[in-house]
Amino acid sequence: MIRESDDVIVKTLARILMPFIVVYALYVVMHGHYSPGGGFQGGVILAAGFVLLVISHGLEQTRRRMSEKMAGAISSVGVFIYGGIGALCLILGGNYLDYGKLSKILGVHQAEARSLGILGVEIGVALAVMAVMCTIFFAIFTVGETDEDEGSEKWPTSS
Amino acid sequence: MANFFLIMGVGMCVLVLFCLYRATCGPGVLNRAAGISAIGTKTLIILLLMGVIYGRVEMFIDISMVYALLNFIGCLVLAKYLERSGEVSC
């Protein structure tokens, strides 16, 4: 179990840095087709923000904001966005992930519909990657939490 | 001018080797952590120099910012792990 850090420097730095991390992750997701980056990288940066939160403010406080159940739900929603946009193109008469066909329901030009479709797919990928990374990190950092180890009497676990 | 940056990049690569020596056979865990952190910082500078050489700094700045962020968080995680397992002994 990771306790809340006593270090003022780490906590203050995390508090200052966290908004910038989120904004930068959104920038990476949005500008995936102009610069290096995209859905996967943006999701990894978002997950890095959560890792920083775990390190500085402890696991309990992070779980209050992002529980394992919620992480699973968000990853499912991300995959659903990805598959849903692909299936929508399929329904509208194109191939799978053929974004040009989205212009019929979005009411914009075909090239703009392509751009918007790519953006939607990347948002879905970013959500899924962020949630799965958080799940992996929580799973790794809570290994042996319920087992009896030498740390369990010092920090009694709630479960 | 590109030649100057190329020489600087090669010099940085040579310096990485020294840090790699400290990271692989440095006595104690703290020396290794410091060596890994220094390698990350030097990689960041090498990335920026590559951007200058290729003439696409605006693209390499994105990568280097992510690299700096992940290096910082990785260093914190390593410190937390060492604090938790109580292996800090120089």
Image (spheres, grey):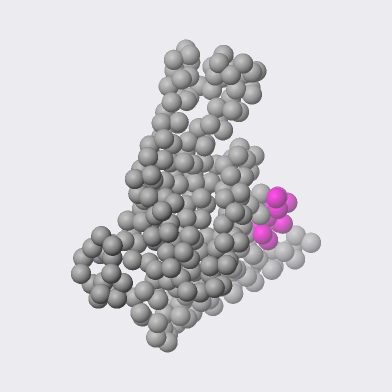
Task: Tell me the magenta residue range.
Answer: B48-58
Q: At x 48% / y 36%, what residue is drawn?
A: A124
Q: At x 58% / y 44%, what residue is drawn?
A: A26
Asked if residue A93 is positioned above or below residue A150 in the image, the reply reads above
Asked if residue A62 is positioned above or below residue A152 in the image, the reply reads above
What type of secondary structure mainly makes up the magenta span? helix
Q: Residue furthest left?
A: A148
Residue B68: x percent and y percent? Answer: 58, 62
Q: At x 62% / y 40%, what residue is drawn?
A: A31
A143 left or right of A7 in image: left
Residue B55: x percent and y percent? Answer: 73, 51
Q: Quadrant of the C terminus of chain A?
A: bottom left
Q: Residue furthest front?
A: A158
Q: Residue B52 magenta-drawn?
A: yes
Whether residue A91 is visible to the viewer of this picture, yes or no, is: yes
Residue A143: x percent and y percent? Answer: 28, 62
In the foreground, A67 or A125: A67
